[in-house]
Amino acid sequence: MIPTVAVIGAGDLGGATAQALAARECARRVLLVDAAAGVAEGKALDILQAGAITGAHTRLEGTSDISRATGCAVCIVADRAGQTPVEWQGEEGLALLTGLASALADVPIVFAGAQQADLIALAWREARVPRERLIGSAPEALASAVAAIVAMEARCSPAEITVAVLGTPPRGFVVPWSEAAIGGYGLERVLSQVQLARVEARAARLWPPGPYVLGAAAARVTDAVLRASRRSFSVLTPLGGEMGIRNRVGALPALLGPRGVAHVRVPALNPRERVLLETALGA
């Protein structure tokens, strides 16, 4: 049976995430949860009615009752509705996750926001949520944006670009260009040094991504969790010794499955990339 996905927060990011989930049709039902019940219900109805045009058949519901997230296959933490939408983070975010603990059981939690690395760390250290259940999807949004820039420079489709993102916000991210590829060929063999320098300069200004690309990334990561995708995704996860670093949250390529992060992969970095990564992670 295709499962239910709960999106906690009906702000700009929560709405974009629900819309992206509906378009992907990776879940039978998307539940949009926010204290502002009218906002959640209105956005859910709007996306549902758009399905008649887009051809999506996902069922959407809005509610203020967070207990209805019980039994969902994936829980996505987004942003609260309001005049100025705010991502769930800090102590309020921790209180939210603590209150959801009994409802979520062993459900993977996807953090859709660009400012939720600290919340992932709190969930791991304070709420004792197993690290494999905690998945930050924002790095995948950044990786997609980088792929789009590379594709413009190489004059090809973004689908031909393979690129990962390492590091952690807000200190910075590192793109391991030595491992990136264009159409199966090493990126450094396809692009000139001048082109690569131009791409690097533009990539440095891509953070933080906007709500639509963050929502699309959260939906893509959630789809990978539900379907146990065989490709890797750049996600934030608590580090347990990878690259010699512990007790920090960082972005790594990972394989995802129904229980969350199934396996993380540490790319082979050249000396320059390793120095940049260690600086970004504060190692």
Image: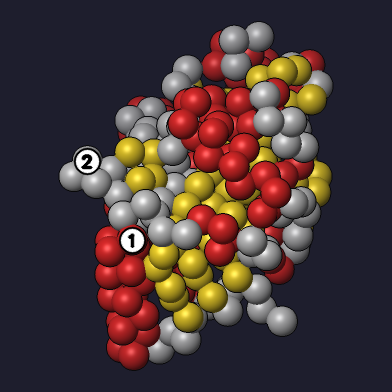
- Amino acid type, mark 1: Ala
Q: Tell me the quadrant of the picture where the C terminus can be found.
A: top right
Residue lying at the far left of the rendered structure: 83
**x, y percent for residue 210:** 32, 45
Q: Is residue 20 left or right of residue 160?
A: left
Please name whichever residue, 214 or 179, is drawn nearer the observer in this view of the structure.
214
Where is 67 relative to 134, above or below? Answer: below
Task: Give neighbour class at mark 1: few <14, some 14-19, many 20+ (Cα, 10 Å).
Answer: some
Please name whichever residue, 233 or 257, is drawn nearer the observer in this view of the structure.
257
Where is 97 relative to 63, above or below? Answer: above
Q: Assign a secondary structure to mark 1.
A: helix
Residue located at (68% from left, 30% from top): 127
Residue located at (55% from left, 32% from top): 94
**x, y percent for residue 4:** 60, 70
Where is 222 relative to 90, above or below? Answer: below
Query: Mark 2 to mark 1: distance in Å?
Result: 17 Å
**x, y percent for residue 274:** 66, 18
Q: Quadrant of residue 174?
A: top right
Can residue 251 be seen here?
no
Q: Tell me the quadrant of the picture where the N terminus can be found.
A: bottom right
Q: Is residue 153 left or right of residue 57?
A: left
Q: Quadrant of residue 34?
A: bottom left
Please name whichever residue, 82 or 161, is drawn nearer the observer in this view of the structure.
82
**x, y percent for residue 242:** 78, 25
Q: Assign a secondary structure to mark 2.
A: loop
Where is mark 2, residue-wise?
84
- Amino acid type, mark 2: Thr
Residue located at (41% from left, 59% from top): 64
Labelled pair 2, 1 in contact (Cβ < 8 Å): no
The mark found on residue 37 in the picture is 1
